[in-house]
Amino acid sequence: MKFERFQQLVRMMFLPDETGNIRTRYENVDASNVHPLVLAYVGDAYFHLYVRMRLLSYEQTQVQALHSFSAQIVSAAWQARAYRGISPMLTEEEQTIYRRARNTKSHAPRSASVADYHASTGFEALLGSLYIREEHERLEELTEAAFQIIAKEMMSIQQEQIHGN
């Protein structure tokens, strides 16, 4: 980011308005006007935190194990699988948000297939949109369903490896 743009953002975010107050959370944010990749940015952060908090149910002392496992769960490949599992649950509006983000031009990292990366971007954008709209009950429902799908598929793969070797 260029230094001039950084300075402009600092002025916009941290300097008081004409009443002397710093803007409050989500002021003037309409999720339908937020760029799909920004929605994905927010959704990615939410999903990371959600997964980390869920993993605390199982492990509270081994930070490296928590990090390693959470990183695997929030990978593009697993998020793409999670999306495929929750897609029948989605409303038409939610599917539109997903498709809009999935189809937005972006560059997939080497660690994921292009299809998985785009699917995970759509999944994250859906979560980000729900978070910004403060639709917490729906967000929890879809995120927990995604977590369960990932957990079951991981267990299935592990069982196959145990019995196949």
Image (spheres, rainbow, N blue to C red):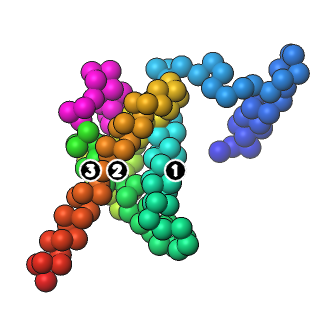
Could you tell me residue 163's position as x and y percent?
A: 12, 78
> Which residues lie in the magenta part?
87-103
Question: Quadrant of the rendered structure where residue 5 is?
Answer: top right
Residue 18 shows up from this direction: yes
Question: Quadrant of the rendered structure where residue 84 is?
Answer: top left
Q: From mark 3 to mark 1, how far is it between C-alphas? A: 17 Å
Q: Which residue does the image show at 38% across and 42% down from the upper left?
A: 143
Tell me if residue 30 comes above or below residue 157 in the rendering: above
Image marks 2 and 1: residues in contact by CB distance under 8 Å: no
Q: Which residue does the image show at 74% across and 43% down from the upper left?
A: 3
Most common secondary structure along the magenta stretch: helix
Residue under pointer 3: 149
Q: Is residue 8 left or right of residue 121?
A: right
- Name which of mark 3 and mark 1 comes first in the sequence: 1
Q: Which mark is on residue 49?
A: 1
Tell me if residue 12 comes above or below residue 3 in the rendering: above
